[in-house]
Image (tube, helix red, strand yellow):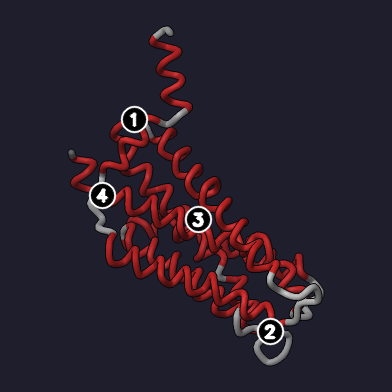
Amino acid sequence: MSPRGEGLIRQVLCLEAFSLLGKRSFLVFIVCATLISIPLAMYYAYASAFIGTAGIENVGGTMSVGQMSELAFMFAMPWLYRRFGVKPLLLVGMAAWALRYGLFAIGDGGTSLWAIYLGVALHGVCYDFFFVAGAIYTATIASPKGVNAQAQGMLTLFTYGVGMLLGSQIGGLLYAQMPPAASIADWHRMWWYPAIAAAVIAILFQLTFRDNSGSEVAA
């Protein structure tokens, strides 16, 4: 095989990017990003059905609140990253997932309707503070090595590939345990699982992640 062909294969398989996993902080980030994508899958799969069960008629309009929140925080993310650094943003993003699912676990179509709307509105914090900040952090680590494109592809593979696949399977098992005509109480019980999982992952991240991006880039 020609050197050019071999190089193309290495790029497609992200082989150079996998060497970045030798950096402890980046390895911890990738592991936590993969794990947090498991409860993420349950939001994309079941939030609309839950909102409808809660008695909210305009499901699409309600979900769009989260999209607008995501857009707003996306524009602010570069400034927030420079101002606070990577670890606080990633930790807030992960904690927001736990808070969101906790809000879903108490929200209903009555006096706790606010919890559902607030949970949806947190989408900007959940997504941008972790995934957008994570992409910036990945670029910080990978760009000096000239493998940013590969590293971003690897991040997508672990999060939207491995993490979302596991999340869809686990979420499917939890959803299958609910009765055919699930009540709001049935949904509440299901949302506690991703809420607790996200909280545990956030604690794990807090205890194990050290932002060494400055020294790693210098190295």
What is the distance, in whole Å, between disc 3 and disc 4 at their CAs?
Answer: 29 Å
Element class at badge 3: helix
Whether label 4 touches label 1, CB < 8 Å: no
* Residue pointed to by mark 4: 24
Q: Nearer the viewer, mark 2 or mark 3?
A: 2
* Residue at 42% in and 31% down: 14
Q: Of all residues shown, which one is farthest toward the top? A: 2
* Residue at 22% in and 48% down: 214
Q: Is residue 121 left or right of residue 205?
A: right
* Residue at 43% in and 72% down: 199
Q: Residues within 10 Å of mark 4 (few under 14, many from 20)?
A: some
Three-letter amino acid code at disc 1?
Gly
Q: Nearer the viewer, residue 163 or 174?
A: 174
Quadrant position of residue 207: bottom left
Earlier along the polypeptide chain: callout 2 or callout 3? 3
Q: Nearer the viewer, mark 3 or mark 1?
A: 1
* Residue pointed to by mark 2: 185
* Residue pointed to by mark 3: 75
Three-letter amino acid code at disc 2?
Ala
Give above or below for 67 relative to 98.
Answer: above
> Horizontal and vertical percent for residue 134?
41, 52
Give above or below for 183 relative to 126.
Answer: below
Q: Is residue 58 left or right of residue 194?
A: right
Whether label 3 touches label 1, CB < 8 Å: no
Element class at badge 1: loop
What is the distance, in whole Å, between disc 4 and disc 2 at their CAs?
Answer: 42 Å
Whether label 2 touches label 1, CB < 8 Å: no
Give above or below for 188 relative to 84.
Answer: below
> Horizontal and vertical percent for residue 156?
50, 44
What is the distance, in whole Å, between disc 3 and disc 1 at their CAs?
Answer: 26 Å
Q: Is residue 214 left or right of residue 10?
A: left
* Residue at 69% in and 80% down: 186
